Amino acid sequence: MHIDRIDHLVLTVADLDRTVGFYTAVLGMTAETFGDGRTALHFGRQKINLHVRGAEFEPRAAAAGTGTADFCLVTETPLDEVRNELAAHGVPVEVGPVTKHGALGAMRSVYVRDPDANLVEISVY
């Protein structure tokens, strides 16, 4: 077997509208409703499916909960511009910019929290 990439991941959220607002307005993702009223956030060739806490779709993680994710998003936008956009939306940078090691090598990153307190790393190679 050879795994090529991540297609999607799932976040469990407390407030669907608040989460969609953050990821679309702040991070520039596109929201989509699909299937039986499910919601996804698209970016690049990936997506994030959203499950509302207490009304998760099956199958689901054994211990699905809010604020348990920690993931990295890669952008081509210069990190100074990313920081300015975050500030314009009132989103504080928790850590960074710092140098980290990603899947393709060294990158510069800032860390923020989404509405459910998930840790979102935004990086530039």
Image (spheres, rainbow, N blue to C red):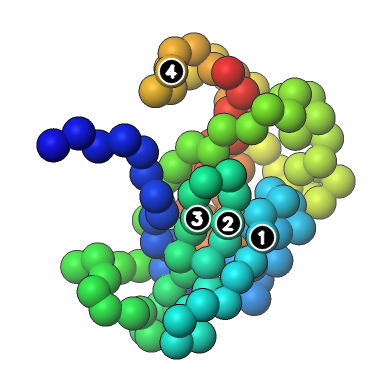
Instruction: Report the quarter where the C terminus lies.
Output: top right
The part of the image, by quadrant, that contains residue 8 is bottom left
Alpha carbon separation for disc pair 3 and 2: 4 Å
Q: Name the residue under label 2.
A: 42
Residue 93 x %, y %: 67, 37
Alpha carbon separation for disc pair 2 and 4: 22 Å
Alpha carbon separation for disc pair 4 and 3: 20 Å
Q: Do the residues labelled 1 and 2 touch (CB within 8 Å)?
A: yes
Of pointers 1 and 3, the one earlier in the residue sequence: 1
Q: Name the residue under label 1.
A: 30
The part of the image, by quadrant, that contains residue 77 is top right
Q: Is mark 1 on a helix, strand or loop?
A: strand
Q: Do the residues labelled 3 and 2 touch (CB within 8 Å)?
A: yes
Q: Name the residue under label 3.
A: 47
Of pointers 1 and 2, the one earlier in the residue sequence: 1
Alpha carbon separation for disc pair 1 and 2: 5 Å
Amino acid on which disc 4 is placed: Leu
Amino acid on which disc 1 is placed: Thr
Asked whether 9 or 62 is in front, the reply is 9
Image position of 70 with respect to 75: above or below: below
* 10 Å crowding of disc 1: few (<14), some (14-19), many (20+): some
Of pointers 2 and 4, the one earlier in the residue sequence: 2
Amino acid on which disc 2 is placed: His
